[in-house]
Image: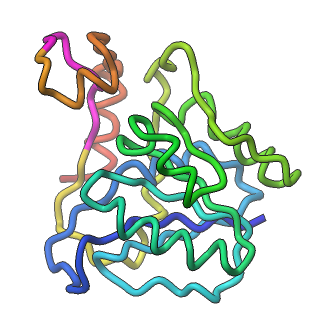
Amino acid sequence: MKVTFIRPNMHDQRSKDAMEPLVFAILKSLTPDHIETVLYDERLEEIPYDEPTDLVAMTVETYTARRSYQIANEFRARGIPVVMGGYHPTFLPEECLQFADAVVQGDAEGLWGQILEDAAAGTLERIYSRETFAPLEGSCPDRSIFDGKRYAKLGMVQYGRGCKFNCEFCSIRAFYGRELRQRPVSEVVAEIERLGT
């Protein structure tokens, strides 16, 4: 099985200072070794629609939603199922399901393994979600998914998710509620040391 990760762009120009989309290193770390993975970041490169793959997984923000739908249509026209995750699908799953075979609401941890099993069996559910968020302990992004990509020389490290404040205008609060989860400091330090920056 092969999974193609896609990071859509907002426009046709390529970026010279795009940062690594950490979500795909997280998904790569949650993907069993026997599954082939490849990332195409449209900010850096064109998407090879005709390259063989079994599943497309896309992160969708509101500002990339329109482009995401165009990309999804291209893959689905070729018979390749598309899974969308991120803020926009979490908040507007029914809209996204007009263009995707499945939507992930919330974080992928605790769901991604089931999605891969269902995709392999041809039994994707429409919506994947959890009642609670998975803990962040043991999270170790697999940055090998970025090999050969020309990202800005800045390694991003995630320490936590969520926010303790309850600002009504904030998408973080809407996504995570008031729950704040943090990784163990020792794991964050070890990741920074591995980055060597």
- Please give the range of residues in magenta: 157-166
The question of residue 14 being in magenta is answered with no
Q: What percent of the width, then of the height, locates residue 178? A: 26, 10
Q: Residue at x 68, y 42 (%)?
A: 126
Q: Residue at x 53, y 48 (%)?
A: 27
Q: Quick one: 41 or 67, which is closer to the camera?
A: 67
Q: Residue at x 49, y 26 (%)?
A: 138
Is 180 located above or below residue 45 in the figure? above
Q: Is residue 13 left or right of residue 119?
A: left
Is 195 located above or below residue 153 in the figure? above
Q: Quick one: 36 or 77, which is closer to the camera?
A: 77
Q: Residue at x 40, y 87 (%)?
A: 46
Q: Quadrant of residue 99?
A: bottom right
The question of residue 160 being in magenta is answered with yes
Q: Quadrant of residue 87?
A: top left
Q: What percent of the width, then of the height, locates residue 159? A: 26, 29
Q: Is residue 152 left or right of residue 80?
A: left
Q: What percent of the width, then of the height, locates residue 112? A: 63, 40
- Residue at the outermost right position: 121
Q: What percent of the width, then of the height, locates residue 89? A: 44, 44
Q: Is residue 60 left or right of residue 31?
A: left
Q: Quadrant of residue 92?
A: top left
Is 60 located above or below residue 146 in the figure? above
Q: How many marks?
A: 0
The quarter of the picture where the N terminus appears is: bottom right
Q: Principal SS element in the magenta part?
A: loop
